[in-house]
Amino acid sequence: MNNTSAVELIDSLNQLNQALIHFSQQLQQSTLPFWLPGPAQNLQQAAALYTDIWYQDGQDGRTTLSQHGIIGADPQLIAATLQLNEAKANFQTLALHYRLSRSTDTLKELHHRSEKIAEILQRHGAARIHLKQCYRQIPLLEHCPSKIGFSWYTSGRSIRKLTPAEAEQKLLKMDTSQRHIQQQLQAVGNLRPSDRLAQIQSQVPVMRANMTWKEQDLVMRKAQNTSLPIIIALNSDNPRLPEYNEPPLTPPEARSRLERSDLKIDPQPFLPSLRAHRYLG
């Protein structure tokens, strides 16, 4: 990566930092109603949740800090949210283009070239940027719905079928000098071309918001997953939150579904490095 690219990334991250600060200030100054049922129960705590883009000690990089809720917004907060989302999108574009997540040198450059970023990094006690939390957009509704129904969505797991050839190609991209990879290559080589493997990915439960707008005889609906409280524009003459329900703070246990007898999957991984299992029967 050349110096110009690193400078562009640092400048973009600084712009994102400024947008985070401005958004946080506007949020904490708000006097409009809100509903925050989780660990963040006031606007100061919500601001910390929204603006945290750093890994915490011991945090799994595959997970993100999340909480649902509703926060009423005036035009100033709406504008700050739009500005922040634009800054997030701009930084994501640059980061993905230059493969920031894979470049240790660039991450070090980001940390050392910007004093403000370094100060924030030290204050948060984090080692590096959490890209998923950095990229995710702030959920925003510029038109207030009449009702929001929150519910946990638990799909359990996703299953993708793999042919032996596809599994072999995936294994060959790994470190084939490792004995366990060699053993798995040998195992997949013993399969018939017509065999199929099930690549299983566990799904994390997510909170889904089902929103309804009613205007005269017209009813509009929209559903979206939400990992952060939703910012909603409120009427200044009558600043009331939309009707909403209060789901449990933790997701229910995933229901076990009966599998078809001809599609049962061996619980023991056949290719552990790919999370690939054999079908039984």
Image (cartoon, rainbow, N blue to C red):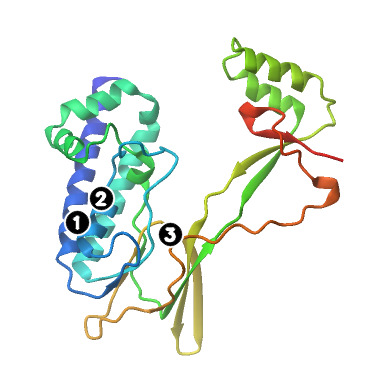
Q: Relative to 33, is 171 on the left or the right?
A: right
x and y, in percent, of residue 199 in the image: 67, 37
| Quadrant the C terminus occupies | top right
How would you rate the neighbour count of disc 3 (Cα within 10 Å): few for under 14, some for 14-19, many for 20 or more? some
Q: Which residue is mark 3?
A: 226
Q: Secondary structure at mark 2?
A: helix
- The earlier-in-sequence mark between 3 and 2 is 2
**Near-viewer residue (272 or 238):** 272
Q: Are marks 3 and 2 in contact (CB under 8 Å)?
A: no
Q: Is residue 181 above or below residue 74?
A: above
* Residue beneath disc 1: 24
Q: CA distance from mark 3 to mark 1?
A: 19 Å
Name the residue type under label 2: Thr
Q: Which mark is residue 51?
A: 2
Left or right, 248 with reference to 186: left
- Mark 1 to mark 2: distance in Å? 7 Å
Q: Residue furthest bottom?
A: 216
Measure the alpha-carbon separation of dots 3 and 2.
Answer: 16 Å
209 shown above or below 191: below
Which amino acid type is marked by label 1? Ser
The three-letter code of the residue at mark 3 reads Thr
Answer with mark 3 or mark 1, whichever residue precedes in sequence: 1
Residue placed at 70% from the left, 22% from the top? 168
Please provide percent x and percent y for residue 172.
63, 18
Q: Mark 1–mark 2 contact, CB under 8 Å?
A: yes
For this view, does 252 lie left or right of residue 126? right
Where's residue 258, x and y in %?
76, 56
